[in-house]
Every structure is written in structure tokens, then in C-alpha cells.
Image (tube, rainbow, N blue to C red):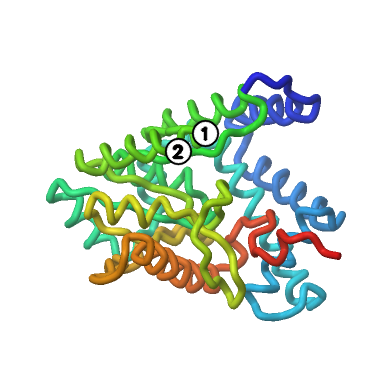
Amino acid sequence: MNDKPSPQDRLVAAGFGAGWAVVPRLPEPLTAWAFRTAADRLWKRRGKQVLRLEANLARVKGTSPDDPAIRELSRAGMRSYFRYFHEVFRLPSMRPEEILARTHAHNAERVYEILGRGRAAVFALPHMGNWDQAGAWFVQKGHPFTTVAERLRPESLFHRYTAFRESLGMEVLPLTGGDNQVFAVLAQRLRAGRPVALPAERDLTARGVEVKFFGAATRMPAGPAMLALHTGVPLIPTILSFRGRDWTVRFCDEIPKPAEGTRQEKVAALTQDLATAFEKGIAEHPEDWHMLQRLWLEDLEPRG
């Protein structure tokens, strides 16, 4: 990216740099309080991101954004979102033993069995809980993996975030204009027995698969389903949430691949099944779903 970063971009990058430098040096109760207080202040201001979160949560709960219960849920959601960033800044200094001890994995035996035989899998995740912590935990369990990251602005922040994730043991590929090349590398990793983990409920390309999600249409990326079909590896929805001070990783059942239909029809069916699995996980832990952007198609369409 050659465009000059804006003052706001530079401020964000400086804030992240300060977070990684300063937060681990301070007592955790103090920094946790500071991030929770910042979340509450942003929530009270009712800015665009908070209003979007409330609109998204209202769809999950099947109610109106004006419902007082949604207002309280969005407060918990903002606290969860800021907890994620607080933990991101502390993760590089966190002992592996602590990450392992505080992570509660469900239905992991099947996953360990697959990977123990030298096979790989595609793990598809919604933006929930702390995906960086879950990645660090998975690496500490002996399963380094490859993922794809959205390019952040400015470029310096993207490189810093990539370096952070690589320091946890992940291989990070940038999601840029060369989608075909990224797909080829991911397929190569899967065939070599290396797992791939991908965020999968928000389409960033405008070329995603249309699915029904909480009763309305949206698009989700085709990549997870295409990779699973192309390489023959399992497609496993994975749900992350917070559990007190700890973390939960729940591996859902492998999504069966359709026996009939064109490749396009199979990708569509797998992606819809993935959306259905995400619905269940998000409905169980809506406060840990960090979706502060427009998601549903009717929200993206200009209103007259």
C-alpha cells in the first residue's frame, strides 16, 4: 500500500505500539480495569460502532435495537471486545503454562485424532472471544497452523500485528488482491498436513456465498468450503468464548460434504451449514461476538 497514512491511522498505530510496550509492565488488575472503564465510556457515548453492535445483536436475539435488554447486552459486548485487546497486549508476555491451564477445550478429541494421523483440517471461526489466544493455545498443544489476515491501515500496524501473531507460532498470509495465490498456498499447507484457521462469517471480498443467517441474507467467504472440497480435509466450525477469567474453545462436528451437485452447489451448501453452526455458537454467547460492522445485505444497501 503506497497511500500516505492519515493522522488517525498513525494515532491508532502508535496506540497499539504503546499497548504492547506498556500494558505487560503494569499490574493486570489495573490494566483490566482501565480497559473495562474505556469500554463503558465508549458504550455510553452511543457512537456508530456501538449502535451497529446493538443492531447486529438485535438480529441475533430476534428483537428491536431499542429493547433495553439489547442495550445491556451491548455493554457486555463492548467489555468483551475491549478485553480482547487487553489480552492481545498481554499475550506475548504470558507464560505458555498459563495459556494451557486457562483454556477449556470441548470436543477436542476428534480434532487431536485427525491431526495425530498427519491429516489437516480447516477450522472456520466467527469473530468471537479471543482468536489470538486460541491460536496461541493451539500452537502450544503442538499444532502450528496457517491463517489469513486482513490488511490493516497503516501498513506499519499490519506488519506489527503480523509479527505479533507470528511470535505466537502462527503463519500469517495477507489477504490482498492475489486471492488465487493465497488459496494455492493454503491448499499446499493443508496437503502437507498443516491446519488452516480462517475467520469466516464476514465476507471482505464482495464475492462471497449468500447464506441465511439469523433469518436474513448475508454473504460469507467461500474460502473455507472451497479449501475443504479442494483438498478433502474436514471443515470444522470452531466457537470461541470467554469463561470468567478463562477461555473456551469448542470444536463443532465436522460438516459433511455433499455427495451430489456441482462444485458451486457444494460450496454453497457447506457455507450455509457453516452459517448455521455459527448461529448456534453466537446465540449461546452473543456478548462475545465482536461484530461492530455492517453484515447483512439489507444493511449494506443504500436506503432511499
Q: Is residue 59 left or right of residue 270?
A: right
Give the residue type that dot 2 points to. Asp
Q: Residue at x 58, y 74 (%)?
A: 214
Give the residue type that dot 1 points to. Thr
Q: Residue at x 30, y 54 (%)?
A: 228
Q: Quadrant of the C terminus?
A: bottom right
Q: Position of residue 151 (x, y in %)?
A: 57, 34
Residue 186 visible in rendering: yes
Asked whether the beta carbons under mark 2 and mark 1 sit within 8 Å of each other, the answer is: yes
Residue 260 - label: none
Residue 173 to residue 293: above or below? above
Q: What secondary structure is marked by label 2?
A: helix
Q: Residue at x 57, y 47 (%)?
A: 204
Q: What secondary structure is marked by label 1?
A: loop
Q: Position of residue 93 (x, y in %)?
A: 48, 31
Q: Nearer the viewer, residue 51 or 24?
A: 51
Residue on which disc 1 sits: 176
Q: Nearer the viewer, residue 280 or 302?
A: 302
Q: Position of residue 105 (x, y in %)?
A: 35, 59
Residue extending farthest bottom? 63
Q: In the picture, residue 68 is in which quadrant?
A: bottom right
Residue 128 visible in rendering: no
Q: Is residue 175 left or right of residue 121?
A: right
Residue 188 to residue 36: above or below? above
Q: Residue at x 67, y 69 (%)?
A: 57
**10 Å neighbourhood of mark 1: few (<14), some, or many (≥20)?**
some
The span from disc 2 to disc 1 (Cα, nearest Å) is: 6 Å
Residue extending farthest front? 262
Residue on which disc 2 sits: 179
Q: Quadrant of the N terminus?
A: top right
**10 Å neighbourhood of mark 2: few (<14), some, or many (≥20)?**
few
